[in-house]
Image: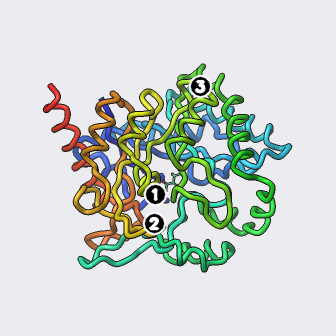
Amino acid sequence: MMEMTLRWFGKGVDSVTLEQIRQIPGVKGVITTLYDIPAGEAWTKERVQAVKKEVEAYGLEVSGIESVNIHDAIKIGSPERDKYIENYIKTLEVLGEEGIQLVCYNFMPVFDWTRSDLAKVREDGSTVLSYDQEIIDQIDPDKMFEKLDSKSNGFVLPGWEPERMSQIKKLFEMYKDVDEEKLFENLKYFLEAIMPTCEKYGIKMAIHPDDPAWPVFGLPRIMLNKENILRLTTMVDHPCNGVTLCTGSLGSNPDNNIPDIIRSLKGRIHFAHVRNLRHFSKGKFDEAAHLSSDGSLDMFAIMKALYDIEFDGPVRPDHGRAIWGEISMPGYGLYDRALGATYLNGLWEAIEKASR
Ligand code: DNO
């Protein structure tokens, strides 16, 4: 049985409260993080216990962490990586001891998810995140952070921490010898180092696909398609080495057949981000409401594929539109994600009952 969850960035960071989340029908858990801890630092037991206690006080559980971010030294493969891997292992131990067994992370160089617009206005007055490669091609990567930050409603965007972004030039320089093969190699090194700890605590590592699913700003990206994801699962062939099946990220490239990718990953999808988007042409898309008919993805086929492979991990609705005047971190308001959760739960119930 899959478990419906909602991403929650933590008190004081998120505009959405645990009280609101617990009132969404069928949502039993949150996916959270310690937003203020920089990538590379080990998490402490006290902090993890505190957030667990806070969430549990609302009758919810911590269903997983998104994200424990990976320090650039690990992605680059520089000599300090072992120290940062050691810290990562310490974090996993703390999480494991607290019974948290799902960790989402990504392996994208420099930038996490990327958009050209965080609030594109649709005919009905709602706004969505959108991507247009032609616009991105005209932006100096140095300016990318300011561009997004100015439209973030005052929130720190996940993966776009100002401390890191102030060093963009240095970061690009550090990645200059890293190509796709090197990135795969460094990912393998990292995963092999952490697998014994994951196995000990039953922690499932769930890599997030690159968003959008192609290289941006000349930086290599590898978690793009079925072939590369299968390469990841076979190169470290351990059940704890799995993926976050993010339909919006993989779906940014219309060549990715998502139900087919899901079916090829039975047992290795540990977490699912389910959302829709609207394709216009290659390299140009808008995010959409979750409903199939609002975008280009067949949400029924996606949920059916998850059901058929007996997926039983957490699912979360993903980026929503900004509607009903809500001000939130772009993509992460309450209203449209709550509608998404309800819709996905409805699809699941129908699929389940029709399969009996
Ligand atoms: C954006 C998110 C990403 C994701 C990370 C996972 O909205 O999907 O920031 O959480 O890439 O590490």
In three-dimensional space, the C-alpha distance between marks 2 and 1, rounded to whole angstroms, equals 7 Å
Quadrant of image for the C terminus: top left
Q: Are marks 2 and 1 in contact (CB under 8 Å)?
A: yes
The residue type indicated by label 2 comes to Lys
In three-dimensional space, the C-alpha distance between marks 3 and 2, rounded to whole angstroms, equals 33 Å
Q: How many marks?
A: 3
In three-dimensional space, the C-alpha distance between marks 3 and 1, rounded to whole angstroms, equals 26 Å
Q: Which residue is mark 1?
A: 253
| Residue 311 horizontal side relative to residue 227, left or right | left
Q: Is residue 143 above or below residue 91?
A: below
First in sequence: mark 3 vs mark 1: 3
Local SS, label 1: loop
* Residue found at the far right of this picture: 79
The residue type indicated by label 1 comes to Asn
- Which residue is at 29% across, 33% downward? 307
User: Does the closest atom of ligand 1 sit within 8 Å of the Cβ of label 1?
Assistant: no
Q: Which residue is mark 2?
A: 282
Image coordinates for residue 277, horizontal then vertical, percent: 35, 61
How many C-alpha atoms fall within 10 Å of the one at disc 1: few (<14), some, or many (≥20)?
many
| Residue 171 horizontal side relative to residue 303, left or right | right
Local SS, label 2: loop
Q: Which residue is mark 3?
A: 237
Quadrant of image for the N terminus: top left
Q: Is residue 267 above or below residue 320?
A: above
- Which residue is at 72% across, 47% downward? 75
Local SS, label 3: loop
